[in-house]
């Protein structure tokens, strides 16, 4: 663990001054009233503009049902005042799970999903809950040991994860079969009472990896049509069969992988963001029924400084973390401006700690997103939304970007915030050794 950067801003003026020093432009508003603005997407209403991002806890049962700690996490989130909850990555098939304890929705555990959705609705006063449907692809570890299912050979990720050149790629028949896996999971999510589904296309899991499968032969590789086929088909079919005014079809997309072409989606050979294909894809998805986009970028496995800006982590970030925050904010704003009728949730705000409400308000006021989501902040400070809206946001309770929750996740241990939530401190000591940063 390392840490050259130390972020301490609490006030909007401190944030503005630091952003100026670093040379980035982050919208900031001193007045945060806009955080309380309700957002209506078709008939689904978020009572304010703050959301909890999907955060895997690796605490499900071996059969894929939410377990005791899963209920505890969502109980805390739901009581915290956010307007919308994006339920964590939930596998559509057993071989696509990221660990033995990742959630996996299936016929045998539907009743448990019904109970957890009911609990979130009840505790939150009816806030919408979106279920993130996923296949972990090259990061599949269904029994806690890697069994990658790769779309194509990617030198950057192959090298990092020791995938040999002769490792088999997923066949077209297998990818065809996933269409039904997503549709079955969509049906179950609707029965469970969720208010929508996310056909997850971020962070280089399988659906996300396909978007950059330039070098893959056959119907799922090469051209734009082929690389986006599975996502487009699933979104269009899920929208026509299950979508409605009160059941939203959504996606959380890495709109740029920030891995150079031809191995990253919407990234130039030099590694810069080029959203041309993202605009085209999102416009087509919106046309076939996509209502809500959760904007993400990069992958936590290769370039976590892009994906979740941090002070200390597995490597020294090659840029000031505020540059990463600015990239996420600008990218979401560019998409919102290109596709104004698509609802957009922004990501990357937890790094800003006590100054995050001012940036969230600044972005909402400038029209750069419709809702602002928080990931690590929700682990650390489940009441963040209520306190931001009431003006009582407490800097002593915020996420500090230390990465201890990520260390837990990497070890397939149950993830939470060992710094702010005492329950996870012994879990951290047992699985990661040493102590979490502020423990
Ligand atoms: C422990 C942990 C679990 C996560 N689980 C998910 C997940 O299930 N699905 C997802 O799309 N992103 C997941 N993320 C990413 C977060 O949703 C979020 O995009 C990221 O942390 C950046 O937002 P933040 O700055 O508010 O934390 C996870 C991140 C962490 C640290
Ligand atoms: S362990 Fe807690 S404080 Fe550290 S990054 Fe995760 S949520 Fe934030």
Image (tube, rainbow, N blue to C red):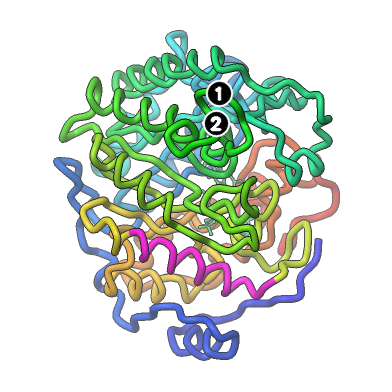
The residue that appears at 57% across and 73% down in the rendered structure is 323
Please tell me whether residue 332 belongs to the stretch shown in magenta.
yes
Residue 422 higher or lower than 176, as above or below: below
Residue 115 higher or lower than 37, as above or below: above
Quadrant including the N terminus: bottom right
Place of residue 410 in the rendered image (x, y in percent of width and height, measured from the top left):
73, 41
What type of secondary structure mainly makes up the magenta span? helix
The local secondary structure at tag 1 comes to loop
Place of residue 360 in the rendered image (x, y in percent of width and height, measured from the top left):
38, 69
Q: CA distance from mark 2 to mark 1?
A: 6 Å
Question: 317 or 434, which is in the foreground?
Answer: 317
The residue that appears at 71% across and 64% down in the rendered structure is 438
Q: Quadrant of ligand 2?
A: bottom right
Q: Quadrant of residue 75?
A: top left
Q: Quadrant of residue 136?
A: top right
Read off the magenta span.
319-335
Residue 278 higher or lower than 410, as above or below: below
On residue 221, which mark appears?
A: 2
Q: Which residue is mark 1?
A: 218
């Amino acid at each position: 663990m390392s840490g050259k950067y130390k972020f301490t801003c609490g006030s909007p003026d401190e944030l503005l001054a630091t952003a100026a020093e670093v040379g980035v432009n982050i919208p900031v508003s001193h007045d945060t009233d806009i955080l309380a603005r309700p957002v209506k997407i078709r008939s689904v209403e978020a009572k304010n503009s703050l959301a909890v991002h999907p955060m895997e806890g690796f605490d499900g049962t071996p059969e894929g049902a939410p377990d005791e700690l899963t209920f505890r996490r969502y109980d805390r989130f739901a009581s915290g005042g956010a307007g919308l909850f994006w339920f964590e990555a939930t596998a559509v098939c057993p071989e696509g799970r990221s660990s033995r304890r990742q959630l996996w929705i299936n016929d045998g555990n539907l009743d448990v999903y019904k109970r957890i959705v009911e609990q979130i609705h009840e505790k939150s006063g009816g806030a919408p809950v979106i279920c993130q449907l996923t296949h972990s692809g090259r990061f599949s570890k269904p029994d806690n040991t890697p069994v990658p299912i790769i779309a194509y050979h990617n030198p950057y990720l192959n090298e990092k994860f020791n995938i040999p050149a002769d490792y088999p790629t997923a066949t077209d028949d297998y990818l065809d079969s996933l269409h039904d896996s997503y549709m079955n999971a969509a049906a179950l999510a609707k029965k469970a009472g969720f208010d929508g589904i996310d056909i997850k296309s971020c962070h280089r899991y399988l659906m996300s990896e396909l978007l950059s499968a330039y070098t893959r032969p056959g119907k799922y590789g090469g051209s734009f049509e082929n690389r986006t086929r599975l996502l487009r088909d699933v979104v269009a079919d899920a929208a026509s069969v299950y979508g409605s005014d009160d059941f939203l079809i959504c996606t959380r997309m890495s709109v740029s992988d920030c891995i150079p072409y031809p191995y990253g989606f919407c990234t130039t050979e030099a590694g810069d963001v080029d959203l041309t294909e993202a605009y085209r894809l999102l416009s087509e998805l919106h046309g076939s029924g996509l209502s809500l986009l959760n904007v993400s970028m990069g992958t936590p496995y290769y370039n976590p400084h892009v994906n979740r800006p941090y002070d200390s982590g597995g490597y020294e970030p090659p840029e000031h973390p505020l540059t990463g925050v600015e990239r996420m904010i600008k990218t979401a704003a560019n998409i919102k401006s290109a596709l104004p009728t698509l609802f957009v949730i922004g990501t990357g705000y937890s790094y800003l700690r006590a100054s995050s409400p001012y940036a969230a308000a600044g972005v909402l006021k400038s029209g750069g997103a419709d809702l602002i989501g928080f990931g690590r902040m929700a682990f650390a400070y489940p009441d963040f939304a209520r306190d931001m809206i009431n003006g009582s946001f407490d800097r002593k309770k915020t996420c500090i970007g230390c990465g201890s929750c990520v260390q837990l996740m990497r070890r397939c241990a149950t993830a939470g915030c060992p710094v702010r939530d005492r329950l996870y401190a012994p879990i951290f000591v047992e699985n990661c050794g040493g102590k979490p940063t502020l423990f």
